Amino acid sequence: MSARRPYRSDVSDARWALIEPVFAAWRARRTGPGTAARAHDAREIVNAILYANRTGIPWEYLPHDFPPYKTIYDYYAKWEADGTTRQVHDLLRDETCQLHGRSVQPTAAVADAQSVKTSTNVSETSQGIDAGKKIKGRRRHVITDTLGLVLAVLVTAANVHDTTGGKLLLDDLAAARPSVSKVWADGGYQNSIFDHGARLGIDVEVVQRPRTKGFEPLSKRWVIERTLGRLMQHRRLTRDYEALPQRPQSMIHWAMANKMARELTGESTPTWRIETGIPLISA
């Protein structure tokens, strides 16, 4: 670590110890001219990624006490492309499951989708209009386990129906987590996803909303609603700023990795609330 003043988003020594072996192995695999001379600390690169994820700041506006922003983005893109980010996420997910006494191979999962607006740098071909929510942007298709931990994620244009994205997610889920035999979903999914799931050996069940007025959490679906809410605590994810659709998927993995690492080390998640003890409005 450098001698700079720490930011609230920095990884602590305890959290870094959880994921440091992944980056040590990544550096050991790097061969070729010039690679031995690279002096940038992987921990500082991770700190910069988490800073951008949490604050929503553009890469080029990162504080100057981080490595150059182009270097940070280069690492961010490489780690997404070669699977390092996913490896970090899955490592922490398995350890979180063990912390809660759960198997790392789940048998049940929950599916949902979330539409978010995009920024002006996203091309028209990469976004669409969610007519139901009246949002122009992208849609995040997510499957979690029963703890709310992400098993699969796919980002598409917002006009891609939940069912279409859900089928693609089920394909990924069946390949990566063949132990899953049950998936709960909401009423937005069409009947064809049931047949698609059956062909993969997965029973897809729609959890019906109660007819009573007002909010009522659904026992088999509230975990994924909570996960989608936690993603929105990261300002980089409140709107989709990424030109390439695979980049927001990586941001989701970093957000979940941050959450899981804090849970594993017993560290609280910082909020954006004012903590001075002074009321915002005087009596």
Image (cartoon, rainbow, N blue to C red):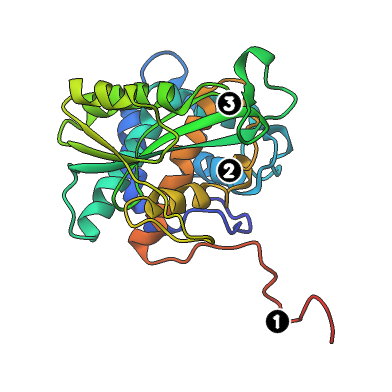
Report x, y in % for residue 24: 33, 37
Give the crowd class for mark 3: few <14, some 14-19, many >=20 residues within 10 Å.
many
Question: On the rendered structure, is 120 left or right of 126?
Answer: right
Quadrant of res 152? top left
Residue that numbered label 1 is attached to: 277
Residue that numbered label 2 is attached to: 53
Report x, y in % for residue 180: 19, 36
Residue that numbered label 3 is attached to: 158
Distance CA(mark 3)–CA(mark 1)? 41 Å
Picture quarter with the C terminus: bottom right
Residue at image position (57%, 22%) is 159
Q: Secondary structure at mark 1?
A: loop
Report x, y in % for residue 6: 59, 58
- Seen from the viewer's position, the closer of residues 30 and 249 is 249
* Amino acid type, callout 2: Asn
Sequence-earlier tag: 1 or 2: 2
Q: Is residue 68 visible?
A: no
**Given the current orientation, which residue lies at the most extreme right position?**
282
Q: Is residue 19 visible?
A: yes
Residue at image position (18%, 54%) is 102
* Amino acid type, callout 1: Gly
**Given the current orientation, which residue lies at the most extreme front position?**
211
Sequence-earlier tag: 3 or 1: 3
Give the crowd class for mark 1: few <14, some 14-19, many >=20 residues within 10 Å.
few
